[in-house]
Amino acid sequence: MSTDNTTELLTQVAVRANALCQSVEDHAGNINATVNAKKAEMDAAKQQAHQDIQNYIAGARAEQSHTLLSRNQQMEPLGSGAIKGFNTIGLTSFEVTKEATIYANPGANDTEHTDAGVAQNFRSNVYNGYVNGPFHILRIKWTRDPEKAARLDDNWSNGYHQGALTTACYLKVISGSVGGEMQPVTQFGDGWQLLACRQKANHQGGAFRAPHAKLLLSSLTGEALICLFGTVSGYANLEANAWGRFAEFARPSDIANLTSRVSNLETPNLETPTA
C-alpha cells in the first residue's frame, strides 16, 4: 500500500472519529439538556409543593380562634407605677405613662394623652387600619435590681399557661435592652417590632408548662413603648403579623368574686302595692 493510500485512510479514520466524537457530544448535550430541564421541573414542583404546604399551614392558623390567657391586654395602667393585672417583678423602680389610645379610625378616634405623637408614630409604622377594641400604648421606664431577673409580667403560674400558646406584643425600645423567650418576628419602621414566642403541644412536657421568662427587662435601666402584651391559646399566625387584641373571658375566680360581692349586697325593702 502506497504512502498516499495510507494517508488517505488515516484521514478518513480521523474524519469518522471526529464525526463520532461530535455525535457523542451532541447526544451528551441533548441528554444533559433533558436532565437539566427535568431537574428544573422537579425543583419548581418542589418549590410549589413547599409553598402550598406553607399556605395551608398559614391558612389553618388563620382559622384558629385564640382566647386570652393573661390579663389586661389593652394595658390599662394602675397609677403611674404598675399595669393592672400584671405581676411585674425584679425592679427597684417602675414608671408607667399612658401615652396613647388606639381606637377605630386612624387619627380621627385615636387619643394622644401626652401630645408626644405616639399614636401617630404607631399608625405610621405598625398598623394604620380600623381597630374594634381600644388599647393603650404605654411608656415604661425601669431600674432593675441587679441581683434579680426582671419580668414584665410573671404570670406563668396564673391562669392556664400551658399547652399550645403564643405570647406577643408590639415594642419599641428607646434605651436599654430586653430579653427572654420572646424574639423579634417582624421589624417595622422607627424601631417598632413584633416580639413573640410560641409553644407547640407536641410532647408531654408542653402540656404541663410554658416559658417562665417571656419578656425580661434585661438592662439595669431602660425605656420602651409597648402595647398589646398578652398570652393566648393556640399557635397564632405571626407570619402574617396577625397579632391584635384577643377575647378575654370570665374565669372561675372572677365569677366566685362576683358571686361573693352580689351575695353581700343588701336586699332592698320593697312594699307590696295595695290592690
Image (cartoon, rainbow, N blue to C red):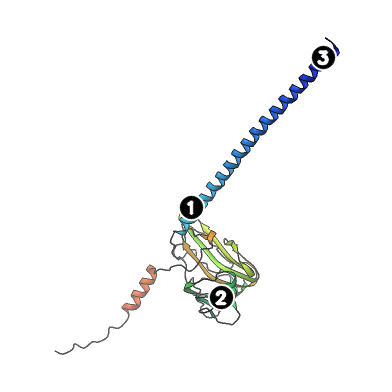
Report the amino acid beneath label 3: Thr
* Quadrant hosting residue 223: bottom right
Residue 126 location in percent, x, y? 57, 69
Along the line of sight, which residue is nearer the eye, 247 or 143?
247
Which is nearer the N-term, disc 3 or disc 2?
3
**Closer to the camera in the image, 85 or 134:** 134
Would residue 262 appear left or right of 213 to someone viewing this image?
Answer: left
Foreground: disc 3 or disc 1: 3
Secondary element under disc 3, as helix, strand or loop, is: helix
Which residue is label 3 attached to? Answer: 6
Please indicate whether residue 18 sits to the left or right of residue 210 in the image: right
CA–CA distance in space, label 3 to label 2: 99 Å
User: How far apart are the alpha carbons under marks 3 and 1?
Assistant: 74 Å
Image coords of residue 36 (percent x, y): 63, 38
Give the residue at mark 2.
138
For the residues marked 1 and 2, what is the alpha-carbon distance in whole angstroms? 36 Å
Q: Residue at x 84, y 11 (%)?
A: 2
Q: Quadrant of residue 23?
A: top right
Disc number placed over residue 56 in the picture, else none: 1
Judged from this view, the residue extending furthest toward the top is 1
Q: Earlier in the sequence, mark 1 or mark 2?
A: 1
